[in-house]
Amino acid sequence: MTTQPILLTAKEIEQLRKEVGRPTLMGKAIAENVTALETFMSLPLDVPGHGDGGSYEHNRHKDNYTYMNLAGRLFLVTQEQRYADFVIALLEDYADKYLELGFQVQKNTNPTGRLFHQILNEHGWLLFTSIAYSCVASEMTEAQRQRIIERIFIPMIEMSTEKYAHRFDHIHNHGVWAVAAVGACAVAIGRPEYLEMAVYGKDREQQSGFLDQVSNLFAPSGYYLEGPYYSRFTIRPLVLLAEIIHRHMPEVDIYNYKNGVVGNTVQALLATAYPNGVFPAMNDASQSMSIADAGVKVAVSIYGAHYALDDNILGMAKIQGSVWMHPCGLEVSRAYEKASAEREIGLPYWPSMELNEGPEGEQGAQGFVRMQDKSGDVSQLVMNYGMHGMGHGHFDTLGITLFNRGHEVLREYGFARWVNVEPKFGGRYLPENPSYARQTVAHNSVTIDETCQNYFDVERADSVHGLPHFFEVNDKNIKGMSAFANNHYDGFAMQRSVFLLNLDELEAPLLIDLYRLVGEGEHQYDYSHQYAGQIIRTNFEYEAFKELNTLGEDNGYQHLWKVAAGEANETALVSWLQDNSYHTWLGTSSNSDGSNSTGEVIFTRSGANDPSFNLRSEPAFMLRSRGESTLFASVVETHGYFNEEFEQSVNARGQVSNIKVIGHNEIGSAIEITTKNSVVTVLVSNQSDADAATVNQMTFNEHTFNWTGYYSVEVKTQSQEIN
Amino acid sequence: MTTQPILLTAKEIEQLRKEVGRPTLMGKAIAENVTALETFMSLPLDVPGHGDGGSYEHNRHKDNYTYMNLAGRLFLVTQEQRYADFVIALLEDYADKYLELGFQVQKNTNPTGRLFHQILNEHGWLLFTSIAYSCVASEMTEAQRQRIIERIFIPMIEMSTEKYAHRFDHIHNHGVWAVAAVGACAVAIGRPEYLEMAVYGKDREQQSGFLDQVSNLFAPSGYYLEGPYYSRFTIRPLVLLAEIIHRHMPEVDIYNYKNGVVGNTVQALLATAYPNGVFPAMNDASQSMSIADAGVKVAVSIYGAHYALDDNILGMAKIQGSVWMHPCGLEVSRAYEKASAEREIGLPYWPSMELNEGPEGEQGAQGFVRMQDKSGDVSQLVMNYGMHGMGHGHFDTLGITLFNRGHEVLREYGFARWVNVEPKFGGRYLPENPSYARQTVAHNSVTIDETCQNYFDVERADSVHGLPHFFEVNDKNIKGMSAFANNHYDGFAMQRSVFLLNLDELEAPLLIDLYRLVGEGEHQYDYSHQYAGQIIRTNFEYEAFKELNTLGEDNGYQHLWKVAAGEANETALVSWLQDNSYHTWLGTSSNSDGSNSTGEVIFTRSGANDPSFNLRSEPAFMLRSRGESTLFASVVETHGYFNEEFEQSVNARGQVSNIKVIGHNEIGSAIEITTKNSVVTVLVSNQSDADAATVNQMTFNEHTFNWTGYYSVEVKTQSQEIN
C-alpha cells in the first residue's frame, strides 16, 4: 500500500527542513504555519455534524481540513510527531462518524455532501485531507489506513464519481474541484484508475475531465469569464492537480500541455490585479479578494517554479509575504532571497494587457491599462468589453474602474453578499445582488432610458459580447483602449474609448473618457460614476433635497436615493476627497448646444428599498443627458494630498479647467481638454473597420481634423512666459 | 550679542551627534528629519505674500518655519553647513519682505498677522523661527543678525505685546502661543525683559503670563476643558517655553512649579488617548488627531526626561515611532533602547482615570475607564460629566464613547470641518458644526423632547456641569462610573452609570449602561447610539421607508434622515459588523410595562439639510421611548471575527440574550442581564449623597435588594451540566 506523500519527495523534504528558522519567505511561511497549527491544536479535537454555510459546524470542518493539510506537511518538514498524531486522530474520528452522517438538505443548486451543505466544500475537504493523509500514512498501521480508506475516502470518491456523476468532470469551476479532489485521493490511496478518470474524464469521448477543463474553461488569453474572484477560487485545485499530474503522470507533460495553458491561466489571473494586489471586483465578487489568497499563493509558487521567476512574480511574493510550503515555493523563496540581497524588490508593475474572451478569443476582451506617475504610483484602468460572466455576470459591458494611490477611484460595488456571515442569509447571495449590484446603473457606465443592458436577461447577455476596437499601450505617455457594444440595448450602438495621459504639469495620469451612443430619437442617458469619500466642490449650483425619493422604480434605480441634483453648465465639475487624495471629474456631453447646459448632475446614495440593510450606503453621481445620438466626454484628475491627522492639505483644486466636445460623427469624435498650461485635443476613430493605417478626416464648425490610425492626442503647452 | 542655541548646549549637541545613523528612536528621528528637510530644500526658496487658511501662501509660510526649525538643529547635529545656509537665506528673504507686507484683512475673531490670516499662526512662525535662528546665529555676521532682529523679530514682538497687547498674555490657549513665541525670541536675541514679560505677564499684578496660564488654564487634574484636541495644540508651546525657562530662568524651577503642573498637564493629555494613540474627539475635534502629533512628541520627550520614564511612556514612544530631536528626546530614546533589549515594549495601557474639571477640580470630571480582555486588547470607555468646553463645547454631558479592537464602537462624530481644505470654506468650521455636530442628538446620549442640552445656550452651558457620583476601578473584572446632570434640561435630573464587566464566557469586556431620567409628566426620550458599519440583524421587525424625511426640524434632527423604524419587543437587539468585529447592542427601558414594547427603534443617517455636502453620511440608531421618569438600560457585546478578504466569520451572534429593567426609584436602579451561561444583576445607587459605606435597600415586585456602597454586580453562572 502507498504510504508516500503525493506532493513531496524525501529529498525535497530535506531541502525544506533547512529553511526552518531562516528569515526567508519559506522560513517565515513555515513559522507562520507552525504558529497557526499550534493555536488550532490547543483546542480540543472536534468532528461535529451538519451546519449551514458560516455555521460553527461548517467552519469547523473547513478548519479541520485546513489544519490537517498544514500538519501533514509540517510533520515531514519539522519531524514533530505530534503533528502526524493530530492528523491521524482527526482521521480516525472522521472514520467513526462520516458514514453515520446523512446527506444534508439541499438549499441551493449545489448538491449536498455529508459534512457540508454543498459538495463543493466536500471536495475541498477531500483534496486537502488526501494530501494530509499521504504525508502521515507511513505513521499508521495497515488496519488504520484501510479503515480510513473504506469509511471515508472511497465513499467520498463514489459520491463524486457516481452519486453526483453529472457534476463530476464537467467543464465548470466546481468540476475542477471535483477532479482535483478525486485525483489527489487516487494517488494518496493508490487507486490510479481514479486519477485517470480525473484527468481524462469518465468517458474519454466526451468533453470532460481536467485536460478538457483547462482547455475550455479559459479563453486563449487565460482569462476566466466569471472574473478573477472565481478564477482565484478555481486556480488552487487546478494547479494542485497539475502538480500531482506532473509528479505522477509525467507522460502528460502537463505544464507544456496546449502551449502551457496552466501557466497562461495563472498569469492571466495575476495580471488582472490592482497594484496593491487586490483583484478588481468584476462579476459578483468581494472588493477585497487579493493575491494574498491561499490559492493564489500556491499558484504564484507553481508559476515561479515552472514558468518564470521575474520581478513581477517576486513583487507578488512580496505582497503575499510568504510562499507555498512546497518545493515550488522554495524556488520562489530562494530567488527572492537572492534578489533581495542585490536590490529592493518593488511592487509588481504588470504590463498593460488585453485578455481576450471566448473559446477562440473572439468574443471580446477585458482591458487592463497601466501607467506609472513620476513617484512610481501605478494608475490602472480596467474596461469590460468581453463576455457576460454567465450566472455571475454583471450587466456592465463598457463599464470601467480606475485605481490609483492605493484605492479604487471609480469603483465597482462588487456583490451584495456577506460571505460566511451566517445571520446574513447564511452568507449567500442576497436579493439585492440581482436587484442592484448586477444592474448597469450600479456601474461606471451609461444606462439608457433607465433600463439594464440586455434587459437583465442572462441568456440574451450570454449571446452577445463587446467588440474590441483598439488597445494601444506602446507610448509611455498615452495609452488607451476602445470598444463597441452594439447589441446590448435594442437599437443602440455604443462605443467607449478611454485613455491614460501623462502630462508634465499633472501629478498623476489623467483619465480621458469618451462614451458615444448612437440611436434613433430622443432618449435619456445616465452617465454614472461610483466614487467614495466627501464632495469638496462643484462648479454648478445644486439642490440638496429636503425629502428623499428613489431615483426610479426598477433596474437598480429603486435602490438609489436621489440626494441632490442641479443643472450643469456646459462643463460640469465634481471634486471629492478620498482618503489622502483629491479627485476631480469634469464632464460634458454633445447635448449642450444652445441650452448652455450639458445636462443634469444627480447625486445618489445606495440603500433605498433595502428592507434588511443588505446594501452598503455608497455615493455616486451621474450626468443625465437627454438627446439623440450623444457623446459624453470626461476626465478624472487625481491631485493633491490631504492628511487629517496632521492637518495638511495641498493642491485641493487641481489643474484641469475645462473639457468640451468639438463634435462626433460616424468617422470619429473630437474633444478638447484645457489645463492650466495646456490644451489637449483628442480625436478618436469611430469606425469599427479602422486600423492603424486608416487615414481619417472630419470637419466640425468648418475646422477639419486629420489623423492616421485609431486616435490622435495632441498637447499644446503654453510657454511659461505667456502664462 | 547672543549666538547660542536656546535649547541645546555644545555638550548635548555632541551626544545627539552620536545617534546619527543608529537604529534608535533618536537615530530614526534624525534620519527622517534629514529626509524631510532635504526634500523641502530641493524646492526653490519662496517667501510669498498673504493667503487664506489652507492656501499655498499659508502652507508655505508654515513649511518655511517648520523646516527652518529642523534645519537649525540638524545643522548643529550633523554639521552640514547647507542647513545653516538654508535658514539664513530664508531669514534674509523674510527680512526683505516682512515689513512690506501689510496686515491681512480680518476674517474671523482672531486678529490678523502680516504673514498669516490670524496671529495664532504668526506666533507659531515666531516661536520656531526664533529657535532656528538661535542655532545658526553664530554663522551670521553681526550686520545680518541686526537686520533680521530689526526687520522681523522686534516688529513681531511689538505686534504681540503692543498692537495686540490684549491678546498677548491672557489665560487662553492662544495666549500660550503668544508668550512662548515672545519668550523664545527674547532668549534668542538676548532681550531678557521680554522673557520676563512672557513668564510673568506685562503686569505682574494681573493674572497673566505663562505661570498664571499653566496654573489656571488646566484643572488640578491637568485636564484642559476644551478637550485633548485643543490641549495637544497648546501643549507644544507650553512645554517648549517650560524647557526654555528651565534652561534660562532656573530660579523659577518650572518643572516643580505648583506641584509639577507642567508634567501633570502632559500626563492628563496622554491619559485621554485611546489604546491606539488617537485622542477621543471630544469637543470640536477631528477623529484622527493622535499622540503622533508633533507637539505631543515634544511633550512625551519632555515628560520622559523630567518626570517619569515608565512603560506607558515607552509605549507612547513606540506608537510615535520617534522622539523629539533634543536631549530630552535622547533620554527617552536611550531608555527605549535599553528596555527593548530586555523585552518587547507593549502598547500603553494607561490606568483608568477620572480627570476633574474647574479651577479647584470641583466642576465635574471626564472619566476614562479601561479594561483588558484575555488577548490584551484594551476596551476604553469615556464619559463626559464635566464642564462645557467653552466656545468649542459640545452639548453632550453624560455622553459616552467606547473603543476596542482598534476602533471606536460607540462613536463621536467630531467636528464638521475639513481642516486646511481650502475649497471647504477655507478649512474653517462649517455651518453644520453648530447645527449638527455640537447638538446632543449627534452624541451617544439621551435627547429629551427633541431639544438640545442647555438649549444650545453656551452661557447657560458654561454655568452648569456634571456631578460625579462614583468612579470605581479597583476591581479588575468590574469597573464603572456614574454621574448626574441635573441642570442641563429644565426640570429634569439625569444620571448615567456605565460599567465594563469581564465575564469568562465573553470575548471582550461587556459595556453595561444605565441612563435614568427623572422629570414631571410624559416626555419623549431618544437614547442614541452612533455606530459604524453594516447592520447584521435585529430581533424585531422594522420598516425601511420608501421615501426619506428628516427626523425632526431642529436641534440636529433636521440633519438626520429617518431611514427605518420598528416597534421593539421588551428588549431590542441591534447587531452590526464594523471592520473585523461584530458588536451587539441589547437595550430596554422601564417604559415597557404592559405594552410589550420598550419603545421604537429608529435608524438614521446624517446628511439631511446639508446643502454643500459638508457632513459625513453616518448611521446611528436610537431607542425612542415615551414615558414619565424613565430608566434606559443596555449592553454592548463585542464578539466574533470577520475577515472579508479571507472569507472567515466566527461567532457572528454573541452570547448575551437579554436585558431587563427590574425597577428604579430614588434609592437605586436594578437591571438583569442574561447571557448563554449567566445571569448578571446590576444594582446602582441613585442617591447623590451615597458613599462607599451606604447601606441600600429597595423593593421591586416584592423582591428586596440589599447592597452596600455605590453599586452591586452579581454574576450567577449556571453549571455546565444544567446548561
Image (cartoon, coloured by chain):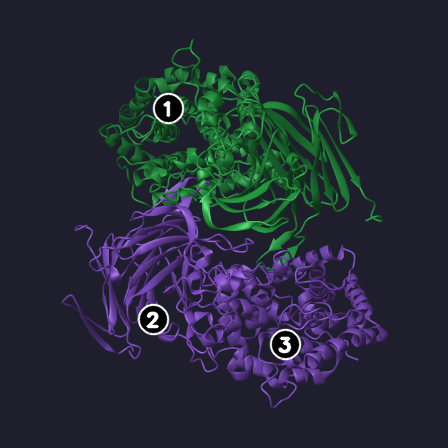
Chain colours: A green, B purple
Q: Secondary structure at mark 2?
A: strand
Q: Residue B674: tell me if it is visible.
A: yes
Q: Label 1, label 3: how many angstroms apart (C-alpha)? A: 75 Å
Instruction: Find residue B494 and name its label.
Output: 2
Image quadrant holding the N terminus of chain B, namely bottom right
Q: Secondary structure at mark 1?
A: helix
In front here: B243 or B172?
B172
Extreme-top residue of the structure: A205
* Amino acid type, residue under disc 3 in the picture: Leu
Query: Crowding near pointer 1: few (<14 within 10 Å), some, many (20+)?
Result: many
Q: Nearer the viewer, mark 3 or mark 2?
A: 2
Which residue appears at 38% of the width and 64% of the height? B447
Q: Nearer the viewer, mark 2 or mark 1?
A: 2
Position of B465 compared to B146: left or right?
Answer: left
The chain identifier of the residue carrying mark 1 reads A
* Amino acid type, residue under disc 2 in the picture: Met
Give a yes or no on whether discs 2 and 1 share a subunit.
no
Give a yes or no on whether discs 3 and 2 share a subunit.
yes
Instruction: Find residue A116 and name its label.
Output: none
Q: Residue A335: tell me if it is visible.
A: no
The chain identifier of the residue carrying mark 3 reads B
- Counting from the top left corner in percent of width and height, residue A565 is at 55, 46
Residue with the mark numbered 3: B241
In front here: B258 or A548?
A548
Instruction: Find residue A185 and name its label.
Output: 1
Extreme-left residue of the structure: B702
